[in-house]
Image: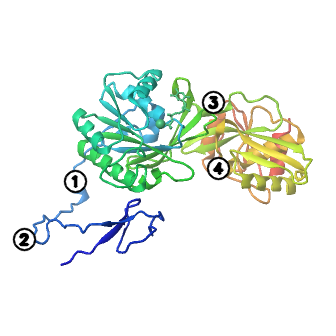
Amino acid sequence: MKQRTMFYCTECGNETPKWAGRCPACGSWNTVVERPPETVKGKGRGGTRIISVPRACPVTELGESEEIRFSTGMSELNRVLGGGAVKGSLVLVGGAPGIGKSTLMLQICGRLCEFSKVLYVSGEESQHQLKLRARRLHVESEQLLVLSETGLEEMIQAVSAEKPDILIVDSIQTLFNDALDSPAGSISQVKDCTMALMRLAKGENITVFVIGHVNKEGSIAGPKVLEHMVDCVLYFEGDRHTSFRILRAAKNRFGATNEIGVFEMGDGGLKEVENPSQMLLSGRPEDAPGTCVTCVMEGARPVLAEIQALVVTSSANNPRRTSNGFDYNRAAMLLAVLEKRGGLKLSACDAYLNIIGGLQLDEPAADLAAIVALASSYLDKPVPGDLTAIGEVGLTGELRSVSQLSQRISEVRRLGFSRCVLPVHRGLVPPPGLELLPVRNIGEAIRAALRG
Ligand code: TYD
Ligand code: MG
């Protein structure tokens, strides 16, 4: 039988029966090439192929092999991984360039080297640069091997020669398989290299950490296309201009995904922040109008955040509104509610909203604190230093309850606050030392918060 010629895209690997100037799957130009007819193994040549029938097995009959976890030496990272790294798993660490991915990986090497052999393969930095970085982070050990290499084949050979327990690849976008025609960083390259790393992890029982850059334009094939292939996906987030970093699990085959790890970038690398609320609240002004503290849930963890507002009489026809770390549309809505239901003449004012510490608040529970901060700035009356506000605000100015209230008020108390304005909620028992101020609408909330 005559084999049909197939065409495939060197960018994304999509197969088509007809040649095209532009790949119908990924839209790249001039990437579709002819694939020579494949010789199908095992068929033809007169012989019949003997295949063994795979046997599916009742789940109850399977033996239990415990997943083996080990600590990475950073409790914030362990927490996100679900209690430590799992042996033989493939973990993808994604994040914007410069956020601190290489730093995090090199830093955990220090602890991992104490009980295992680590191979750090970097396609981004030379061995000399890695040495300097390792010295700065104090992770010099004979058990830490560094290799500056971009070839996939060469890397696999180094792995079989050194037999490390842990492999770190920095980054998937620089790794390159010669057998493919597409350039490093293209979708087919990163997919192929990730498959090879998966085989290494499962076949040799090596724990593999892979770094992947994400960028806004998406021009480099990012971790998004790899999410389904790997065991764990962690994203490292934060504002490059502030030192606060959050590590979040987007996928975890061995644990929950609602945990976050908090770090601070400093001169000596990343430092774990065990008490994020305290760090975010440090330096809070006393008795200044226009600031209010709230409690948001970052994953399963309550975190206190300070919302600042500045309301000034506008000189322009179109008053200026900006919000930083707070959803712009949500802020516009709250300003409208405050004007219509709270009776404050905000349409003639410029309004600025800012969340301290580079935190992004995307939870409606922060509404009430934003309202209180705006009103406090408009009326030029400070919110007492021991008061917090939690709650969602509706369009009629009513207050709505939010989830995990008891966890939030415990955190509020733990950080030393003694009063909390919140929606009416039956059966909520405050922790000792915390006075609850239940309110039904924003008018009551502003009166309760700015009373004195
Ligand atoms: P890096 O880990 O190289 O980022 P990525 O691998 O995600 O691209 O971190 C880069 C930034 O971190 C760089 O701007 C400098 C800063 N940094 C520190 O502030 N302190 C340190 O000790 C180190 C190693 C880096
Ligand atoms: Mg890097």
Residue 62 — which label?
1
Q: Give the vertical position of 244 relative to 249 (above or below).
A: above
The quadrant holding residue 394 is bottom right
Cα–Cα gap, marks 1 and 4: 44 Å
SS at circle 2: loop
Camera-side mark, 4 or 2: 2
- Residue 431 vs residue 173: left or right? right
- Residue 53 vs residue 275: left or right? left
Locate the N terminus by quadrant: bottom left
Residue 238: x percent and y percent? 58, 40
Q: Residues within 10 Å of mark 1 (few under 14, many from 20)?
A: few
SS at circle 3: helix
Camera-side mark, 1 or 4: 4
Residue 229: tell me if it is visible: no
Residue at the image position 82 percent from the left and 46 percent from the top: 351
Q: Give the vertical position of 204 relative to 280 (above or below).
A: below
Whichever of callouts 4 and 2 sits on the residue coming sooner in the sequence is 2
Tell which of 179 and 47 is nearer to you.
179
SS at circle 1: loop
Residue tagged 3:
279
Residue tagged 2:
47
Cα–Cα gap, marks 2 and 1: 36 Å
Q: Are marks 3 and 4 in contact (CB under 8 Å)?
A: no
Residue tagged 4:
362
Whichever of callouts 2 and 3 sits on the residue coming sooner in the sequence is 2
Residue at the image position 30 percent from the left and 39 percent from the top: 68
